[in-house]
Amino acid sequence: MIPQIHDHGSNTGRLLAYLYGPGRSEEHTDPHLVAAWDSLVRDPGRDPQATLRSLKELLDQPVNALPRSRRPAEHVWHISIRNAPGDPILSDGDWADIARRMVAATGIDTGNGAGCRWAAVRHAEDHIHIIATRVREDGRQARHHNDAKRAQAEARLLEVAYGLRQLNPGDGTAASHPTRAEHHKAERTGRERTAREELRETVRRAVAGAQDEAEFFDRLGRAGLLIHTKAMPSGDLAGYSVALPDDVNADGEPVFYSGSTLAPDLSLPRLRQRLGTSSDGDAEELLPASATGRSGCRPAPARRRTAEAAWAAILVIDDGGDGAAAAQIMAAGEVLDALAATSAAHTRRELREAAAAFERASRSHVRAERRHGRALRRAARELVYSGPALGRGEDGAGTAMAIDMIFFLVMATAHWHGRKSHAQQAAAARKAADHLRAAYRNAAGPPLKAASRRGRSLPAPVRARQAAAVRQALPELAEQILAEPGWYALAATLTDTEQAGKDPARLLAQAAARRELGSAESVSDVLIWRIRRTAGLPADPTGPRRQTTTRTAVPNTPTQQRRSGRDPGRSV
């Protein structure tokens, strides 16, 4: 059950006309009253003698009885209560009980005859609207502070009482949802998302791997946002707000949103903590001055280093302290934003959805020890400045390798939040993992298909030797692996390791020991990327070493030359 407190209003008649009207897309059917503050109130939807005007006058009577100087400027209180998809259809009597419990829980109806006047209207099977005046019968204003939080708490109780889908309780760290007016404005202007949502994503991307405030604001400007800053008398920056150039109000002026209204962790003080520029921070460069990003980074090595940083972060989340884990999780959100911003077209949508879902998982009340997230933030920075990946060859395979390890990082995040009873964050991480699965399939499909062809073309004795290595290193998983479609691509990778002078059985054992494989759709796929990364092989398994004799391959990049032959995760 989803209760939503809407913005206060000043026109009771206009809201009643909407609730009893056909809706913006003729979606309202049979609008009628299910409950009200007085059981004798007549229903304009079904009583031909009742009118919307008469209901409006009854609702507004306590307000109009006050002197004008004491009337609240916005006296209309409005909440909608919607069941989740798949919930059973409730009767009018059920919704009437829900309405009475909700107005009592939020402080609108005191239950002693001195509460506010209210009416609950149903114009669809799955939800009702409650309209109320914020002036009580005794002339005092309603005490409905924290009404949104109280409504959520009552909704959890109602879900149990009516056998509805039980949603996850929040902890006050979620970003603000767009208002109804913002949704309607987006529809009128032909936007897929509200201005608030577009700005939130743009600001998140601007902070991903940013070195300092100057770079952050420079990125916002280059993204095309309008920026207002607020300065203290000393001249120091106190806050900022942003706007889309084409999102204007009735007077044609841009509509600005402060960072804190976009998300709690996008306020200037919180950003300074993340960037290490707060008064108690210890700033540290994320990249050497010679590689500040506008040159010197390439997509494939940046993605390989992202996979390495993700693996190190998994170990911290599993075994480190809460502050260190929270820092890794926050930085993981930056990596997802950076990867989505620089991904090829065939993975961009799913990665963007994964980043948006993980945004909720990146925040909790656990205080992050930000120094622990620097490796991931450095990886995010390299991704941003490496530029867009082509989505094929080494770039495409590197993306698949990075997504594969980030998937396990996101699952580690879900497990961590689950242990802390952070229900919404755990659910958000699992949702992000679903999108990462889809992105992985898009990214890994072409290189693994080509690698599979290579594996099928290997001589039978070579494939038999690789199968024996699998049985030797992973006896419990061997038959599952050999039956998977990805086995042939794994056989090609194991052959590459032999040609690079490595021991396939040892690499298999090391790769399998790196945390659980149960959440992987294909164990073969996971082993391929882990082995190629550990052995210093190119990410792209479609570029085989044609020789049949064993010799040590020369790594293709300076990064691979430094890391060839060692397990980057073992130094953690």
Image (cartoon, rainbow, N blue to C red):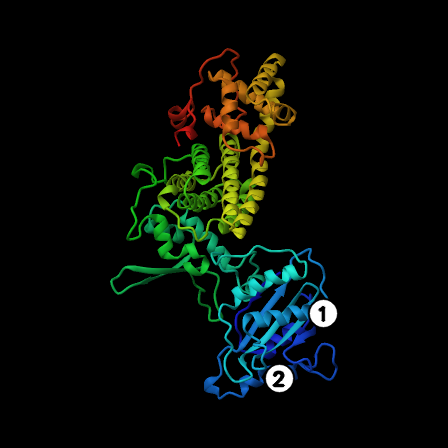
- Above or below, comparing residue 76 to residue 484 in the picture: below
User: In which quadrant of the rendered view does residue 306 lie?
Assistant: top left
Q: As drawn, which residue projects farthest toward the top? A: 549
Question: Of label 1 and label 2, which has the lower sequence position?
Answer: 2
Number of marks in the rendered image: 2
Please state which amino acid type lies under the numbered disc 1.
Asp
Q: As drawn, which residue projects farthest toward the front? A: 112
Whether the residues at callouts 1 and 2 have beta carbons within 8 Å, the answer is no
Left or right: 497 in relation to 32: left
Please state which amino acid type lies under the numbered disc 2.
Leu
The residue lying at 35 percent from left, 51 percent from top is 273
Q: Measured from the top left, where is residue 470 in percent x and y?
A: 57, 20
Asked whether residue 60 appears in the rendered view, the answer is yes
For mark 2, give the secondary structure. helix
- Frontmost of labels 1 and 2 is 1
For mark 1, give the secondary structure. helix
Q: Measured from the top left, where is residue 328 in percent x and y?
A: 42, 43
Which residue in the protein does label 2 denote? Answer: 58
Q: Measured from the top left, where is residue 377 in percent x and y?
A: 40, 42
The residue lying at 69 percent from left, 75 percent from top is 33
In what quadrant of the picture does the N terminus appear? bottom right
User: Mark 1 Cα within 10 Å, few/some/many (few <14, many 20+)?
Assistant: some
Q: Which mark is residue 92?
A: 1
- Above or below, comparing residue 283 to residue 29 in the picture: above
Which of the two residues, 158 or 545, is positioned nearer the viewer here? 158
